Amino acid sequence: MSVTNALHGLSHQARDAKSWPFEQARLLLDRILRLRLTDGERDLAASLIGEGKAAEAVATFPALLKPVVFETGYGPSGLPHLGTFGEVARTTMVRVAFRALTDDAIPTRLIAFSDDMDGLRKIPPNVPNGDELALDLDKPLTVVRDPFGTHASFGAHNNARLCAFLDGFGFDYEFVSSTDCYRGGRFDPTLLTALERFDAIQKIMLPSLGEERRATYSPFLPISPRTGKVLQVPTLERNLERGAIVFRDEDGEQVEVPVTGGGVKMQWRPDWALRWTALEVDYEMSGKDLIDSVRLSNQVCKVLGGTPPAGFNYELFMDENNQKISKTKGNGLTMEEWLRYGAPESLAYYMYQSPKSAKRLYFDVIPKATDEYLQQLDAYNRARAEGANGPAIDNPAWHVHHGAPPEKGSPVSFSLLLNLVSAADASTKEILWGFIRNYIPGATPESEPLLDRLSDFAINYYEDFVKPSKRFREPDAKERAAMADLVARFKALPVGADAEAIQNEVFEAGKAAGFEPLRGWFQALYEVLLGQSQGPRFGSFAAIFGIDRTVALIQRALAGELVG
């Protein structure tokens, strides 16, 4: 089923959905109705949409045919990163929820905006030809030479990487370049309004600045006709008739440039307000660190004659030491690192979870996020198979897959795969699949594509993180007796015993040995047999690894062969 078809007929469920994308979608719908319709029209339109008659509402009120504009921002001084993915993924979740809420009758657009007219203020680390790049400092990113030699400019190179990045995840978006908007005239009417209302903008911005900055601040950053640099200099004069400003160029001469046609760029907070106004943005979210910037930009937006967009501030990600993740510091995870160890779906799930709560973004969150995603997908598909009253649109899998989750997940958890790789020393996927086929007769990489992908991730994660940190220990007397008992119980199991029967014997061995609570028994199994303090459901592990192999593993541990 296509995403578009999957979103029809869901307005009744969407109206009562509790997940945060639907909460945001309802707030956005209220905003759209408030701005576009009169009081009487708004009540009728809201009633029709609530009754599942969004198409009728749109036919009755043509103002609703104007697309609802979602926006995300990108600074192309660096490559796309996890924050870029998170913002586009979360915004897309709200967009899809809005489409479901309105039965996809009100058009929507998602703009991925690149602030590529910003001046290059410092040389990014880890780029080639940095010495040459230094010659272009302070010039717009779409003028700065491309250090990689593949595009017309550094900005064009990173913009291409952004589009390839978003395309690779299947996002539906429209790329918009700041340079194109400034130079192509798209921003011209709003820039002239900003020139006319210069003093009102200054009144908003100056109190937010330090004393030294206030003395030279202007919302307009002129582009020097001589050097091509984006200059942070005071505006000396304004000429409304010519639509121009006067400033002192780097050589000391006073120069007049038009604010239109790419003659200037605005400071970033007024620039944010400029694009909201000129592009008529309805929704944009941002990080918690930008709360004050959003407040100021909202005020400037109103001065420019626009209406600030709806949205919310999400919490920031922290590294393993609970320090804020920083591109400059290079702490935390990169996109490439997550995608070496986890599926994109697991990353989207992690972004979905509690966006207003700070979360650690480090390697050890990947297995847990992966298994939680798999559990949610299984729950969604069980509800679908049982004929539940419509899809469970509050299930995270619904949001991760934009309203159309796949009908099949993985029959094996990621944590179980990790422990299978560990116990079997499965250095290749072929070895791993040998065990999987024994556990799931007839299974192939083609019939279980998600499981096949997870196998690659599990091997990579094991080799890089689990294997170097494995620490086996000898069992104590109590544990040794319980494991010997477990060996006897396993040998007595009938051929073909399933995971549940095996798990029951594990429980019984632990109880008979006096483990209370049983958590200590399972931890002992993991530490003695797998060299780690946590692991999967042991019955499932033994079922897929094989009873005979599990017995042999326990006997090797009892003989002291795993400690060394």
Image: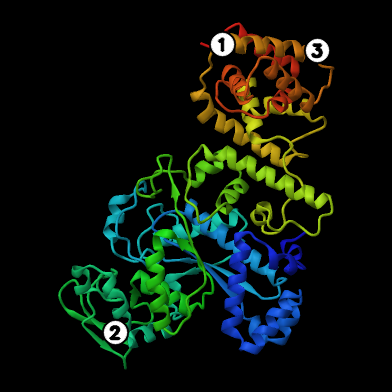
Residue 73 rendering spot, x and y as whole percentages:
47, 64
Disc marking residue 492: 3
Query: Amino acid type of disc 3?
Result: Ala
Give the structural element (helix, strand or loop) at label 2: helix
> Would you say 113 lies left or right of 221 here?
right
Residue 210 rendering spot, x and y as whole percentages:
22, 67
Question: Nearer the viewer's eye, disc 3 or disc 2?
Answer: 3
Residue at x 64%, y 68% (from the top left corner): 98
Q: Check whether the beta carbons of the residues at disc 1 and disc 2 lie within 8 A of each other.
A: no
The N terminus lies in quadrant = bottom right
User: In terms of sequence position, does the residue under pointer 1 or pointer 3 come before the other?
Assistant: 1
> Would you say 6 lies left or right of 309 here?
right
Q: Give me the C-alpha separation between circle 3 and circle 2.
A: 87 Å
Q: In this orientation, does residue 222 appear?
A: no
Residue at x 71%, y 11% (from the top left corner): 485
Furthest residue toward left: 252
Give the structural element (helix, strand or loop) at label 3: helix
Residue at x 75%, y 18% (from the top left corner): 547
Which residue is tagged 1?
476
Query: Amino acid type of disc 2?
Result: Asp
Disc marking residue 54: none
Q: Check whether the beta carbons of the residues at disc 3 and disc 2 lie within 8 A of each other.
A: no
Which residue is tagged 2?
199
> Would you say 53 lies left or right of 213 here?
right
